[in-house]
Amino acid sequence: MVRKRVASTHYFSKKPSKYGKKYLISLHIHGHTLEFLTYSSLFSGKKIDEGTRLLLEYIKVPREGTVVDLGCGYGVIGITIAKINPRLKVYMVDINPLAVKVSRYNAKINGVEENVVVLLGDLYEPVKNLKFDAIYSNPPLSAGKDIVEKLIIEAKDHLKENGFIQLILAKGGEYYRSLSEKYYKKVEAISKKGYVILTMYK
């Protein structure tokens, strides 16, 4: 049973109290330069967090198909993937209306709006009828254990055969790796800078 989440300013919040200060952040990765509008009220709103940067450094991107970024925040992961491989259809989901609005804007300024669909909702709910070649997420520590377990366990129902889910975790790496091995045929783990990048194959 999932515990009720307490409203706050991170990207799993339904009602951010205010937008806060506006920032324009640049990212140089995999031969691309991207820019992101963001606000201080969003998760890692002042700069791209280390976890997201690490996940993008080790990101696995399918050659074709459909992928989803869950808890997309202001869109760094999903938009970067769309930039790396324009052949992909990239869905992005967030429960925070501001994050959805900003992600749509960021997709436009980075020239990937034709490849990206940004949806408002909780985790898999807005894409419950879709199957993906890959699922990505960087859940913040404040998301809690239940949310990460839900991401991992329910991903299998939303992946195509031989699809995968890739997460970066700031804690609990060994626990989530053991949990993943119960549900997936192959699990890879990379430990870097106190984080664990888990890739789980259906």
Image (cartoon, rainbow, N blue to C red):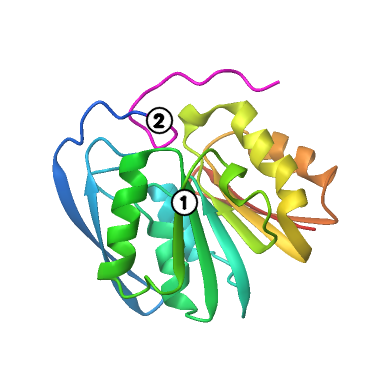
Q: What element carries label 2?
A: loop
Could you say where residue 113 lies in the image, as x and y percent from the top left? 37, 70
Asked whether 146 falls inside the magenta stretch, the response is: no
Q: Mark 1 belongs to which amino acid?
A: Leu
The chief SS type of the magenta part is loop
Q: Quadrant of the C terminus?
A: bottom right
Could you say where residue 163 lies in the image, as x and y percent from the top left? 73, 64
Write the residue at 41% across / 67% down. 80
Write the residue at 40% across / 21% down. 7
Q: Mark 1 points at which residue?
A: 119
The answer to which of 153 and 102 lies nearer the viewer is 102
| Residue 92 appears in the picture as rendered | yes
| Residue 48 appears in the picture as rendered | no
Query: What residue span does the magenta drawing correspond to?
Result: 1-14
In the rendered structure, which disc, 1 or 2, sits on the residue that comes first in sequence? 2
Q: In which quarter of the image is residue 1?
A: top right
Asked whether 10 falls inside the magenta stretch, the response is: yes
Label ID, residue 14: 2
Density class for disc 2 (Cα within 10 Å; few <14, some 14-19, many ≥20) is many
Marks counted in the figure total 2
Write the residue at 64% across / 27% down. 146
Q: Mark 2 belongs to which amino acid?
A: Lys
